């Protein structure tokens, strides 16, 4: 397929595809999905070999958020029966993080529900970062606390944070349909602040909220423009009790096309297979490792993932290997701060409390009437997290 040959060549040169090419990837048929995966897989292996970076989520504060992100089980008015608790103590968070590190995670992602941290919250998280760094040598810590005020990114960096996550989630054009309590521009501003403070920026998307192909291409191109080091690709987990509970639009093949498109647009960036993989990719998850070079180990913020052991077995069985702390994730030119723009001549290339794509009423996202559901949708795979942080039960790692 000429399209795929062109995209492989561009990906190997870190050159931005055209919007038409990105749209064409999303428009390929299910019959061509293996060719699409094989092509994007060449780009993935060029920049990341067969390594898979493992990340581990610790939900520091769960539920009771005043914001109204439609996809989120922690949102204002959510009826989802998730765990609700306030800030974990540093030692509790550190204990949870240690379980993930023992399971092979290289990065711990500290997430808190809410619009954004107060300065007191930043103090609290700083102590947690210090405790985790003291007890887990070589671990990377990413904070994900919502919208940042001036100076907070610098304080987190000084406390030892390596990265900050805040997702764009969807296109600028549809952002107002999924959230009304803050704007797309607010989100861009926080990613920019994290970047400017010298934190590794992590910003991604949530697919499956009823968006168009154009919206998906818009958000991935916008991410490339923001130049994050990592791009989590979440697939909506349609939680009962949230406005998007009836939005079941994704098939495994569609998920693979979205990941492939993201890889072609962000060839040398850590593309992370994030929330929703078990629910939407199901037995096709191993194919996604040919596209993404990073996954979350174990559970998500408010939902349970497959057993951590199953994640590790999947990586081995698919012929990949877990990336060790002695290896730098990003290719040399990016690790040195070169970014994509240094080669391809245009600025190339994560969202806070939505990293694990909790599900998302007030939504203006196409309210399909009746609710559209793809054949094979597996509502039974949505499991609310009942173990790990905030409970007395052992975490899944
Ligand atoms: S995504 Fe974050 S800000 Fe939005 S409702 Fe959920 S916890 Fe709150």
Image (spheres, grey):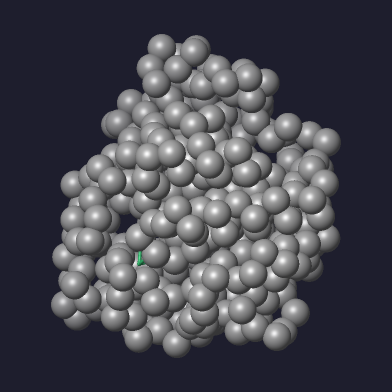
Q: Nearer the viewer, residue 41 or 146?
A: 146
Q: Nearer the viewer, residue 150 or 357?
A: 150
Determine whether 54 is above or below 392 in the image.
above
Q: Nearer the viewer, residue 206 or 58?
A: 58
Determine whether 105 is above or below 359 in the image.
above
The structure residue drawn at horizontal position 79% and vertical position 51%, both measured from the top left corner, is 134
Tell me where residue 244 appears, x and y as whole percent. Answer: 30, 73
The structure residue drawn at horizontal position 19% and vertical position 56%, both measured from the top left corner, is 176
Q: Nearer the viewer, residue 203 or 376?
A: 203
The structure residue drawn at horizontal position 72% and vertical position 63%, both measured from the top left corner, is 94
Q: Is residue 287 left or right of residue 354?
A: right
Tell me where residue 223 appears, x and y as whole percent. Answer: 39, 37
Determine whether 221 is above or below 319 in the image.
above
Residue 104 visible? The answer is no
Residue 142 visible? The answer is yes
Tell me where residue 358 appears, x and y as whole percent. Answer: 44, 69
Q: Is residue 208 left or right of residue 285?
A: left
Number of callouts: 0
Tell me where residue 13 appears, x and y as whole percent. Answer: 53, 17
Q: Quadrant of ligand 1?
A: bottom left
The structure residue drawn at horizontal position 33% and vertical position 40%, both measured from the top left corner, is 188
- Which quarter of the image is occupied by the C terminus? bottom right
């Amino acid at each position: 397929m000429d399209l795929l040959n062109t995209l492989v060549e561009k990906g190997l040169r870190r050159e931005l595809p055209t919007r038409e090419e990105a749209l064409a990837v999303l428009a390929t048929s299910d019959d061509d999905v293996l060719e699409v995966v094989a092509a994007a897989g060449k780009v993935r292996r060029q920049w990341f070999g067969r390594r898979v970076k493992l990340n581990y989520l610790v939900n520091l504060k769960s539920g009771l958020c005043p914001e109204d992100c439609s996809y989120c089980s922690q949102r204002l008015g959510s009826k989802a029966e998730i765990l609700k608790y306030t800030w974990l103590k540093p030692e509790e968070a550190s204990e949870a993080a240690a379980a993930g590190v023992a399971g092979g995670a290289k990065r711990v992602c500290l997430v808190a529900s809410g619009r954004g941290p107060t300065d007191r919250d930043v103090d609290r998280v700083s102590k947690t970062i210090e405790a985790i760094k003291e007890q887990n040598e070589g671990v990377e810590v990413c904070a994900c606390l919502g919208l940042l005020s001036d100076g907070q990114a610098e304080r987190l960096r000084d406390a030892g944070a390596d990265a900050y996550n805040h997702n764009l989630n969807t296109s600028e054009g549809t952002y107002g349909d999924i959230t009304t309590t803050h704007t797309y521009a607010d989100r861009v501003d926080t990613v920019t602040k994290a970047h400017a403070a010298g934190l590794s920026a992590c910003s991604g998307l949530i697919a499956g909220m009823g968006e168009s192909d154009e919206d998906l291409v818009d958000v991935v191109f916008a991410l490339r423009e923001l130049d994050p080091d990592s791009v989590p690709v979440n697939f909506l987990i349609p939680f009962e009790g949230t406005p998007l509970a009836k939005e079941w639009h994704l098939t495994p093949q569609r998920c693979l096309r979205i990941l492939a498109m993201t890889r072609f647009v962000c060839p040398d960036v850590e593309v992370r297979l994030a929330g929703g993989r078990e629910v939407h990719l199901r037995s096709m998850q191993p194919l996604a490792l040919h596209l993404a070079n990073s996954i979350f180990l174990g559970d998500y913020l408010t939902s349970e993932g497959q057993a951590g052991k199953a994640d590790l077995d999947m990586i081995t069985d698919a012929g990949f290997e877990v990336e060790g702390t002695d290896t730098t994730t990003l290719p040399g030119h990016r690790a040195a701060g070169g970014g994509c723009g240094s080669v391809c001549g245009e600025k190339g290339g994560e969202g806070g409390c939505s990293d694990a794509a909790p599900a998302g009423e007030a939504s203006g996202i196409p309210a399909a009437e009746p609710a559209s559901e793809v054949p094979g949708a597996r509502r039974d795979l949505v499991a609310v997290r009942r173990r790990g942080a905030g409970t007395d039960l052992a975490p899944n790692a």
